[in-house]
Image (tube, helix red, strand yellow):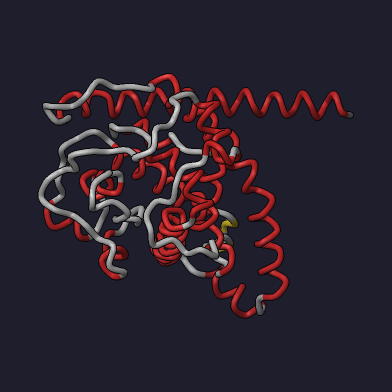
Amino acid sequence: MRLGYTAMTLSTFLIDTVRLTIWLMILALAFAPIERLFAPKNQTKRKGLLADIGYFYLNGLTPALIMATPLALLSAMMRAITPDAYTNAIAAAPLWLTIPTGLLVAELGSYFIHRWCHHSRYLWQFHAVHHTPDHIDWLVNTRAHPIDIVITRLGGLAPLYVLGLDKTGGQAGMVPVIITLIGTFWSFLVHANVQWRFGWLEQVIASPAFHHWHHTNDEHRDRNFAATFPLIDRLFGTLHLPDHYPPVYGIDEPVKPTIHDQLVRPFMPAGRLGARHDEIDQSS
């Protein structure tokens, strides 16, 4: 019995690894030519490629496994306490209505958890890994501590489960899957090393310029927390979108470039980073 379970687990792992490899190839074929054509003239040499590929596989395999149990428990709990009339109404709602509703709900949840990651001394230790690069391109999207990935994704997905939007349109789980796919692709796009501007659309949907300013390491840092809709940053006073790209990226503190050091550092008191800025909630 145990042998069969181990074989099944290994088979699933291999299938997921192949799936990620194909996905990596598709992304590389899509973004590498675009970045070569539209990258800034004064771009610096790409560093940490092998580490970023390692993060791509690590964060493609582990966070989903970690999140499965809490999301299932949350769904079961909400199903037990939610009136049947509401559950049935949500289940009967068409996807054309629940997808945009779910996107907005997930975006609000992601915004606040993302902002908290910058303001909490503890959460910043994990989130800082994503801000360590002094360059930005599509592959930097997956350079993140797995714990940070779990926290930020739960921040966006948990509200969907609380509101019952995980069971809608007659297809359980379809809304979270679609929203995750949209968010995943768009997050690669906004990290891309391209000098693209969307004109007036930048006020509606996140562009590379919008998100690059989130990674700046000058006096304008800690802005643009929304993943997809800049209007949320405008609403809460955190929007910064000038007509040029940031002059500098990264964080102040030196961080070792290896995956091992970056994964372990948040748990080591001697290696922890300082607070993101002075206005830290001391209760965090």
Which residue is outermost to the right? 1
**Residue at (50%, 69%) from the top-left corner?**
93
Between 131 and 279, the residue placed more toward the observer is 279
Q: Quadrant of the N terminus?
A: top right
- Location of residue 98 in the rendering, given as x and y in whole percent from the top left corner: 45, 65
Camera sees residue 131: yes
Horizontal arrangement in the rendering, residue 34 relative to residue 228 (left or right) = left
Between 71 and 270, the residue placed more toward the observer is 270
- Location of residue 139 in the rendering, given as x and y in whole percent from the top left corner: 36, 30
- Location of residue 25 in the rendering, given as x and y in whole percent from the top left corner: 40, 22
Horizontal arrangement in the rendering, residue 179 relative to residue 233 (left or right) = right
Camera sees residue 96: no
**Residue at (66%, 29%) from the top-left corner?**
12
Between 143 and 56, the residue placed more toward the observer is 143
**Residue at (66%, 69%) from the top-left corner?**
78
Which residue is outermost to the front? 270
Horizontal arrangement in the rendering, residue 201 relative to residue 66 (left or right) = left
- When the figure is inspected, residue 55 is found, relative to residue 229, above or below; the finding is above
